[in-house]
Amino acid sequence: MRAAIITAPEKTEVLEVPTPTVGARDVLVRIRACGICGSDSLYISIGGLPPRQGHMPIGHEPAGEVVDVGGEVSGVAVGDRVVVNPMALADDIIGNGGSTGALADYLLIKDAVRGVSLEVVPDHIPYEVAALNEPMAVARHAVNQVAPRQSDQVVVFGAGPIGLGITIALKSLGVRHVIVADILPERLDKALKVGADAVINSHDEDLTARLIELHGPGDSMWPDRAGTDIFLDAAGVPAVIDAAFGAAKRGAKLGVVAVHKEPISIDFMNVMSNELTIVGSMGYPTEIFEVTKDIVENWEKYNVIISHTFAFDELAEALQCVATPGAADKVVITFE
């Protein structure tokens, strides 16, 4: 079978490797779609992760069709459409330094347990949408971390895949008012399509003034604060943190799911006096299949997140697209 392998820094090849053999507790999945993550670009740039630098399989956002099931596996049948938990085996994480990757014709799910390592989805869900399951679990965990109430007013910074996933999750939970802020008009259009109540172009508009206009004034010992209850950073730029703390009322929360590559200064007098809460979010400790139900119920909205699809034969072009700033939002590889 074919598999995408990082063979050196900045070099990924599609190589012929043996098709896996199914054991009694395993499931073999024919990959039908696999998303490309920003972390894939990072792994490629450094030549892979130890101990597999120079020969590391990649791909950790798969959806596919079950083609073989071990005799000791229950709840999964040949022909089922499935999504996968790449983190199920802590010592062999799929596409993140483990022995296998999902950018391949087939993926062996070792010690397969439905609801732990894989989950079945209905046949009407397109494979490329099902492949969003892993990154959307990241978005759902970010939402769970800030524990929104239905009465809350929220602003999401960044309308990339995670920010859009957060927006869908918030509205699925019945959150009253969700604003999405970004600097790209086309991304803001997508935010409205997936259910945002309002959008702010933070390049062209006064963010705090618009928040006050939309969410009302907020209680604070400092002037010009918005009635926004929760700020969620899915952008990862220092200006977002400055903007959030500059608009935050007493008791507001800031959730951070974006990767910040440099340290950021924070005014702790502001944090203390307004009793602000800062909450980090990483991965998806319990959300990998929690989000699956929402994808099934709202797959048309999640479909909006996908900006490009490429065939596996076009992998080099797809990776270049992902690595080019501003060229794409979510890229998914499809397999015939």
Image (tube, rainbow, N blue to C red):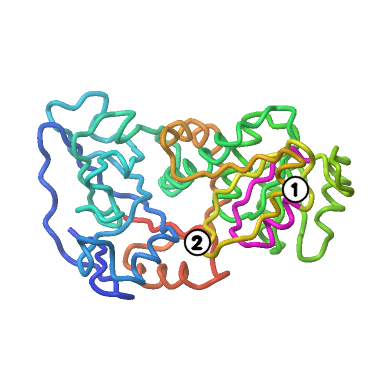
Task: Please identify the quarter of the rendering in which residue 83 is found.
Answer: top left
Q: Which mark is residue 308?
A: 2
Q: Which residues are magenta?
A: 228-245
Three-letter residue code for mark 1:
Asn
Residue 93: % across, % down? 27, 48
Residue ID at (79%, 49%): 247
- Which quarter shows the N terminus? bottom left
Residue ID at (14%, 60%): 17
Q: Is 147 positioned to the left or the right of 222 in the image? A: left
Which residue has dot 1 on it? 270
Residue closer to the observer: 234 or 79? 234
In the image, is residue 239 part of the stretch drawn in magenta? yes
What distance separates the C-alpha of mark 1 from that of mark 2? 42 Å
Residue 124: % across, % down? 44, 36
Residue closer to the observer: 66 or 108? 108
Q: Secondary structure at mark 2?
A: strand
